Image (cartoon, helix red, strand yellow):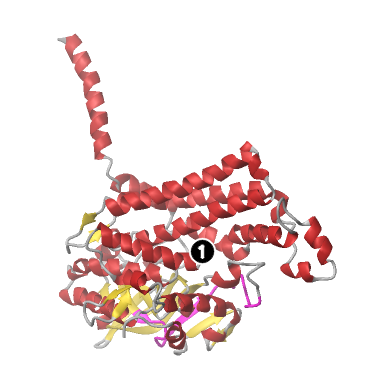
């Protein structure tokens, strides 16, 4: 099949699925007001792959059929090919201005990285390695949109999965059959779940204990699988009547999140990658290639978001000429410095990568994980700086309609900027507010804080994973010099 069109993506969403939101079951997600605009945004990404202006950047020939496939599925052979993927990720992310964290390219990169680690699954049985490779090829050749669910419901975090008040509060294997495994329970957090094609389930790295075997599994199934239910959070943008002038980001790019409930769901054996396996569950995420390519994609997307933040800060301060004051210009400079630092780390990750066991190139994990740790903190700093620079101007913002209403002349005159009329100056302020202040973008700010899991545990693990051997050796040399000096005195 190869690359799909936006229309083909939307037609695929009409397959039967159980989606519950705002007290009702949605029978056709393409017609539900809270989903319609995000679906259109995703459909645009699919159509970009057919656009002659972008096709060479966004696609590559399938190694199986020769048909064009999404380049996100391509294992890079060297740093140059990894750079081509960066260009594709950036083009996709610019289409959504960096505010869609779970558009298709994220999971495309993720499943490619997992497939690069298929030998990991083979340790538990050759059939699991084969299952992973076949599934990756299936997703690639059909250009599917995946979501994933990794975590367990937050019911009683002081207890292990098998210690919860019900054996199947957390997703677990209920029984084995000739056709596959029957699973029951719940997983979170399936971002974009209602409007995706497939659901990938695997552990998030939180340690499982003895007795948790039934909860230790990895598999993939269609979102339309009987017994699979999406229980969605309340949408922050409940309908599709917002305009782009007043809400340039939230009107189109809200990503809904869902709790996924499995009501005795059959997972066919060919879709199982491991199960009842504590060791596999506790080590999968940290296998070399499993997450690094998804992290690479996310780092590019975050670069686009940082770029938008720098541009918004620049335009916001220029619109009222506060940028002539050193204390304001300094804040803009800090944001731009964060952007350039992020860009530098991305470049270093691409150029200082290494070959994996398959002979393919993977980015440098140390640089990417460093940006993972710093990104959410820098993101919060940027939001605070823009709030300080915008001050009351971010709150006193009429709607676009007011500039064409009965008091339009006053709106144009009193809301004007240093070199623009009110209509254009207010648009910049509203863009800044919608970038970080609206409920939908506040959700993204919170989501990105926990994008990689608990920041404390991630950073603590990084302290042991990162390579600082050069500096430890230099420190040991210094310590040795001090000891030698005293040894000489004793002698």
Residue 217 in the image, given as x and y percentages of width and height: 30, 71
- Quarter of the image for residue 475 reads top left
User: Which residue is painted at 74% across and 59% down in the image?
Assistant: 422
Q: Is residue 177 above or below residue 132?
A: below
**Quick check: can you spot residue 336?**
yes
Look at the image and tell me in which quarter the C terminus lies: top left
Residue 435 in the image, given as x and y percentages of width and height: 59, 60
Q: Is residue 390 magenta?
A: no
Q: Residues within 10 Å of mark 1 (few under 14, many from 20)?
A: many
Residue 405 in the image, given as x and y percentages of width and height: 81, 71
- Quarter of the image for residue 150 reads bottom left
Look at the image and tell me in which quarter the N terminus lies: bottom left
Could you say which is closer to the camera, residue 223 or residue 44?
44
- Quarter of the image for residue 469 reads top left
Q: Is residue 263 above or below residue 54?
A: below
Predominant secondary structure in magenta? loop
6 lies left or right of 209 = right
User: Which residue is painted at 67% across and 61% down in the image?
Assistant: 427
Give the magenta part as a residue range: 221-241
Q: Is residue 234 magenta?
A: yes
Say which residue label 1 marks. Answer: 97
Label 1 residue SS: loop
453 lies left or right of 36 = left
Total count of labels? 1
**Quick check: can you spot residue 293?**
no
Residue 9 in the image, given as x and y percentages of width and height: 43, 83
User: Which residue is painted at 60% across and 67% down in the image?
Assistant: 248
């Amino acid at each position: 099949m190869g690359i799909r069109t936006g229309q083909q993506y939307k037609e695929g969403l009409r397959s039967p699925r159980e989606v519950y939101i705002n007290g009702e079951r949605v029978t056709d997600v393409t017609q539900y007001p809270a989903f319609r605009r995000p679906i259109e945004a995703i459909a645009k990404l699919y159509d970009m792959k057919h656009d002659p202006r972008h096709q060479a950047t966004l696609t590559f020939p399938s190694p199986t059929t020769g048909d064009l496939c999404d380049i996100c599925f391509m294992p890079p052979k060297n740093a140059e090919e990894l750079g081509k993927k960066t260009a594709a990720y950036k083009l996709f992310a610019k289409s959504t201005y960096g505010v869609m964290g779970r558009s298709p390219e994220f999971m495309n990169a993720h499943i490619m990285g997992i497939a690069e680690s298929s030998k990991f699954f083979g340790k538990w049985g050759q059939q699991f390695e084969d299952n992973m490779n076949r599934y990756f090829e299936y997703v690639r050749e059909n250009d599917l949109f995946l979501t994933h669910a990794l975590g367990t419901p937050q019911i009683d975090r002081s207890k292990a999965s098998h210690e919860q008040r019900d054996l199947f509060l957390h997703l677990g294997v209920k029984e084995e059959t000739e056709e596959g495994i029957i699973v029951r329970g719940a997983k979170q957090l399936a971002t974009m779940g209602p409007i995706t094609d497939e659901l990938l389930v695997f552990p998030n790295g939180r340690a499982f204990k003895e007795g948790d075997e039934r909860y230790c599994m990895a598999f993939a199934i269609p979102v339309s699988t009987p017994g699979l239910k999406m229980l969605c959070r309340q949408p922050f943008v409940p309908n599709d009547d917002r305009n782009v002038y007043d809400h340039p980001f939230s009107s189109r790019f809200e990503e809904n999140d869902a709790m996924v409930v499995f009501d005795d769901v059959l997972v066919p054996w060919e879709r199982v990658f491991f199960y009842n396996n504590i060791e596999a569950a506790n080590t999968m995420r940290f296998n070399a290639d499993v997450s690094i390519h998804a992290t690479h994609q996310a780092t590019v997307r975050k670069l686009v978001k940082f770029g938008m933040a720098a541009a918004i800060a620049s335009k916001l301060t220029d619109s009222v000429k506060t940028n002539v004051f050193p204390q304001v210009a300094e804040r803009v400079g800090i944001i731009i410095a964060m952007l350039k630092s992020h860009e530098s780390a991305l470049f270093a990750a691409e150029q200082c990568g290494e070959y994996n066991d398959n002979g393919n190139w993977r980015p440098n994990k140390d640089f990417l994980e460093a940006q993972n740790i710093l990104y959410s903190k820098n993101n919060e700093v940027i939001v605070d700086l823009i709030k300080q620079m915008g001050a009351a101007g971010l709150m006193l913002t009429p709607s676009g309609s007011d500039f064409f209403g009965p008091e339009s002349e006053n709106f144009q005159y009193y809301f004007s900027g240093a070199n623009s009329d009110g209509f254009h100056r207010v648009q910049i302020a509203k863009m800044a507010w919608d970038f970080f202040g609206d409920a939908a973008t506040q959700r993204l700010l919170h989501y990105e804080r926990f994008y990689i899991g608990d920041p404390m545990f991630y950073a603590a693990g990084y302290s042991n994973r990162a390579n600082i051997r050069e500096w430890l050796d230099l420190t040991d040399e210094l310590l040795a010099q001090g000891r030698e000096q005293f040894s000489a005195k004793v002698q």
